[in-house]
Image (spheres, coloured by chain):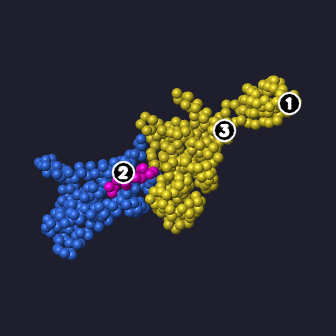
């Protein structure tokens, strides 16, 4: 649906994005994750045709953005970080304007307008001036604007920024619902959001793609070790010895001692080796029962920190 | 494009700006009206439209300052430029919206000649050519104003730029008279004010019409180029 190849954008000497390539399949929800200034907005602005790239190609639904800009724009609904609203219009007038701008037929628009307003829950404010709406409602009108003409691709730049927690949850729900019929790219620097909503994550830092994967795989791939916390009933010294003896285990630490013969340990092991079975077998042989075993794979938040900090080290 | 003309035109009248400008224009014009009458009915059309075009120098910058500056500031520029319309349609839409407001203003000013028609007998032909010249002049001024508005996201700055450039452009003909000689002739040939004065003197010349329209086209085109260039090297 969306194919991006070797996209680069220079601002003078600074490369806002540098050789970025990725594809988004039809029906996917892809999250763009990165700190502020990583190049998320620049990439989105190029895909939507608001600014031009220095080099590289963007194809949406098979159309090249430089050769067929109008066709590409017809396929995209865009909600920029600051929702583009005419403050002096009512919600209803504004959406009518968008429909005319996007050349939606008037009969089609009549039924579509009702659906869109119900979907984003703005029907009851449709006759109010946009400037009098709260931030949350403005955001929804911005979303509604992107949905006008039911484009196949939706691009949302930081769709939940500045909203209260309840509104955030609603908007996320809405995005997930839209994901059933649309291809969606959304950007965020909030990690739980991306892992909650997206099928795939593109982590971008300093204009380069740092990683592309599903939220789960990223979590697995990026930890150098697989880590577990294990609670075992048995004398600490002996248990430690047994754990250290298991092939693949790198390190064992006591994290909390409950009593003399019950303690929690953190075990670090080789990433590609499953040490859980041998641990169980050997402890069972020795007669020390496992009370709890839990994986401690990195949360996206940690991955994110790790990625961005190691990247920074490389650059410096 | 119609959608943009429609929206912008309405937005002029949704905010006080159009009313204030038209009201102010008519108020001050009424003073000039009396003045033009005192100068005699024979030269009424010329004096009257000349004073209108003088007022235009102040009105147009205020009218066009928001055209692009406001969209840039409020982020609606993104909406316009990512919609399936071409850039020239956006620019032309905004230009024609401002021209429409200007035509409303022009229509309002017709009150004075109408009053005169009731009580006296002004020369209809000169009145027509003067008004034609005035409308063409307005279209030129607005193209310059729109261009200025595309340069900045600050409306005040846009207004000042367009006022200064309009002032400079209109003074070319005075400078031309002052300098004289060959340079003066060239400057005079380039000056749209010189062309405009022909209209208010009652001369309708096709080359003048073409010249003034081309002048407007050039500035609309420059506006398109400015916006285009920003897309390529946005800093």
Query: Residue at horizontal 52%, vertical 64%?
Result: A109
Tell me: B7 left or right of A240.
left
Chain of residue at mark 1: A
Q: Is residue B14 left or right of residue A239?
A: left
Judging from the image, mark 3 belongs to the subunit labelled A
Q: Residue B115 location, x and y as percent?
A: 23, 72
Q: Quadrant of residue A308?
A: top right
Residue A299 shows which numbered tag? Answer: 3
The chief SS type of the magenta part is helix
Res. A288 mark: 1
Give the chain ID for the blue colour: B
Bin the neighbour count of mark 1 within 10 Å (Cα to Cα): few under 14, some 14-19, many 20 and up. Answer: some
Circle number at residue B200: none
Q: Could you say whether the residue bearing mark 3 is in a helix, strand or loop?
A: loop
User: In percent of the image, x 23 and y 72: which residue is there?
Assistant: B114
Give the mark count: 3
Counting from the top left corner in percent of width and height, residue B183 is at 15, 47
Residues at marks 3 and 1, CA–CA distance in whole angstroms: 30 Å
Q: Quadrant of residue B131?
A: bottom left
Q: Nearer the viewer, residue A80 or B231?
A: A80
* Both labels 1 and 2 in a single chain: no
């Amino acid at each position: 649906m969306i194919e991006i190849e070797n996209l680069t954008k220079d601002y003078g000497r600074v490369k806002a994005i540098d050789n970025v390539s990725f594809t988004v399949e039809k029906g996917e929800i892809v999250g763009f994750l990165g700190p502020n200034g990583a190049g998320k907005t620049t990439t989105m602005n190029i895909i939507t045709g608001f600014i031009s790239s220095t080099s590289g190609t963007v194809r949406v639904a098979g159309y090249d953005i430089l050769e067929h800009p109008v066709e590409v724009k017809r396929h995209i609904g865009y909600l920029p970080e600051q929702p583009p609203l005419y403050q002096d219009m009512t919600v209803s007038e504004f959406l009518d304007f968008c429909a005319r701008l996007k050349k939606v037929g008037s009969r089609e628009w009549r039924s579509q307008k009702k659906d869109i307003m119900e979907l984003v829950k703005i029907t009851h404010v449709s006759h109010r001036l946009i400037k009098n709406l709260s931030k949350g409602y403005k955001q929804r009108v911005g979303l509604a604007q992107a949905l006008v003409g039911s484009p196949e691709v939706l691009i949302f730049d930081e769709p939940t920024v500045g909203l209260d927690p309840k509104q955030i949850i609603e908007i996320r729900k809405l995005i997930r619902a839209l994901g059933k019929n649309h291809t969606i790219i959304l950007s965020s620097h909030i990690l739980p959001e991306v892992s909650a909503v997206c099928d795939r994550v593109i982590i971008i830092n300093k204009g380069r793609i740092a990683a592309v994967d599903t939220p789960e795989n990223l979590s697995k791939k990026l930890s150098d070790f697989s880590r577990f916390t294990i609670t075992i009933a048995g004398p600490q010294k002996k248990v430690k010895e047994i754990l250290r003896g298991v092939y693949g285990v790198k390190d064992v630490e006591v994290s909390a001692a409950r009593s003399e013969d019950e303690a929690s340990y953190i075990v670090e092991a080789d990433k590609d080796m499953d040490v859980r079975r041998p641990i169980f077998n050997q402890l069972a042989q020795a007669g020390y029962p496992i009370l709890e075993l839990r994986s401690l794979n990195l949360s996206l938040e940690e991955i994110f920190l790790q990625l961005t900090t190691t990247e920074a080290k490389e650059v410096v | 494009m119609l959608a943009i003309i429609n929206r912008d035109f309405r937005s002029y009248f949704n905010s006080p700006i159009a009313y204030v400008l038209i009201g102010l224009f008519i108020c001050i014009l009424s003073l000039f009206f009396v003045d033009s009458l005192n100068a005699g009915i024979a030269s009424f059309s010329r004096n009257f439209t000349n004073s209108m075009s003088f007022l235009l120098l102040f009105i147009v910058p205020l009218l066009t300052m928001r055209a692009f500056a406001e969209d840039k500031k409020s982020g609606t520029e993104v909406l316009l430029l990512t919609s399936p319309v071409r850039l020239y349609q956006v620019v032309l839409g905004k230009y024609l919206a401002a021209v429409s407001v200007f035509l409303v203003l022009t229509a309002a000013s017709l009150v004075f000649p109408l009053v005169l028609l009731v009580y006296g007998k002004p020369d209809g032909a000169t009145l027509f050519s003067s008004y034609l010249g005035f409308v063409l002049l307005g279209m030129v001024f607005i193209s310059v104003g729109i261009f200025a508005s595309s340069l900045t996201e600050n409306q005040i700055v846009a207004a000042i730029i367009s006022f200064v450039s309009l002032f400079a452009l209109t003074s070319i003909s005075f400078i031309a008279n002052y300098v004289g000689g060959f340079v003066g002739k060239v400057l005079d040939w380039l000056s749209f004010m010189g062309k405009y004065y022909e209209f208010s003197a009652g001369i309708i010349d096709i080359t003048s019409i073409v010249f003034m329209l081309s002048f407007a086209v050039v500035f609309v085109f420059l506006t398109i180029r400015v916006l285009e260039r920003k897309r390529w090297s946005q800093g």
